Structure formats: C-alpha cells, structure tokens
Image: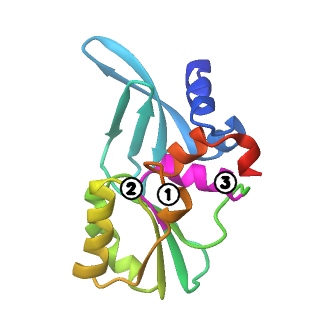
Amino acid sequence: MNPVLINYLKSRMIPYSLGKQYLDEVMTTGKGRHYFSVGFRNDSDGYALRNKHYKGCEGNQDITTFDLPSQESVAVFEGFFDFLSALVFFKRASPRFPTVALNSTSNRKKVVTYLKQFNTVNCFFDRDQAGMDCFRLMRNTDGLPVVDCSTIYDGFNDFNDFLVKTPKTMLN
C-alpha cells in the first residue's frame, strides 16, 4: 500500500495490519491526474473511497455486509472508518456477529429487509443530523428494533472521531 495511505490510516488510528485486512489501494483518474485512495469493498463489488482530500465511491454505491451465522443482533455502522474504529476499540480483528457498513446513510433502504431478521439492530451512526435522521427513519418508518449505540462516543461526531481524539491511555 502507498506510504501516504498508510500514514492516512495511522492518522485515523487504524493500524495498518487491520487496514490491509479490509481495505484495498484504489487508483482513480480525473482531470488528467491519478489519485490513490483506500477502498472498502461493498456488496456490489464497488468501493467506498477515502483519502486525506477525497470521500466518494468507485463503481456502484452499496452496503457492505459481514453475514456471520445468524444471531439475535446485528451491528450497523454509518461508514467503514467507524466499523474499523469499533474493531480497534473492542480489540477485535473481525466482527463477532453480523455487521453492516452502510457506506452512506443514503443506503438505508437497501438494508431494511436484511435487518428485519434480527431482534436488535445496534446502530453506530454519526452524532450529526444525517446520522440521527437515519436512526429515526429506521425506527419510525422501517419499524426496526434499533438501539442507539452512539452513546459510546458521546461528545464526538462519530466512532472514528472519538478514537482519534481520545488519549490512548483512556482507551485501554
């Protein structure tokens, strides 16, 4: 992986060992230039892309599911950096139960049918208007048994913001 992208992961408190497990280096071109981003593969074989200066997608925008043996609960993350941040926070290399990264709150409707099989939908959404709106729509419109897990990072915008700004000694 490009050293600039490795440093970007480090700035987001994501260890390279975890990043290389879930992310690919994706090169895109635009305006006659080449751009390198970390790419998180989605269920349509597209990518959610991020680098220090860019946030977008390549191919079809879609959710990413980790469909582990059926259990009663599922974790839903707004974005892939929040998913990776949760793995770091909980000291895990992989999810323990079914997990979904929306990759954008605009993908909410794509996941509703899948989420209806669970008794508890643990939501780790951003603590901004888009995240709160997505949570309310899942609860009120979609009728899902959602639980707001963003209280873990109360006072921060999202799980990654919490991970980056919290002293490492407090996370142990």
How far from the left and from the top, in percent, is residue 121? Answer: 46, 77
| Residue 79 shown left or right of residue 98 in the figure | left
Residue 127 image label: 2
Judging by the rendered image, the residue that carries numbered circle 1 is 154
Instruction: From the top left corner, tell me how far across and down residue 76 is, in percent.
Output: 46, 66
**Element carrying mark 2:** loop
Looking at the image, tell me whether mark 3 or mark 2 is earlier in sequence order. 3
Mark 3 and mark 2: span between their CA atoms?
18 Å
Amino acid type of the residue that numbered disc 3 sits on in the rendered structure: Phe
Residue placed farthest to the left in the image? 141
Q: Please tell me which of labels 1 and 3 falls first in the chain.
A: 3
Numbered circle sitting on residue 14: none
Most foreground residue, 6 or 127: 127
34 to the left or right of 19? left
Distance of label 1 from label 3 (alpha carbons): 14 Å
Earlier sequence position, callout 1 versus callout 2: 2
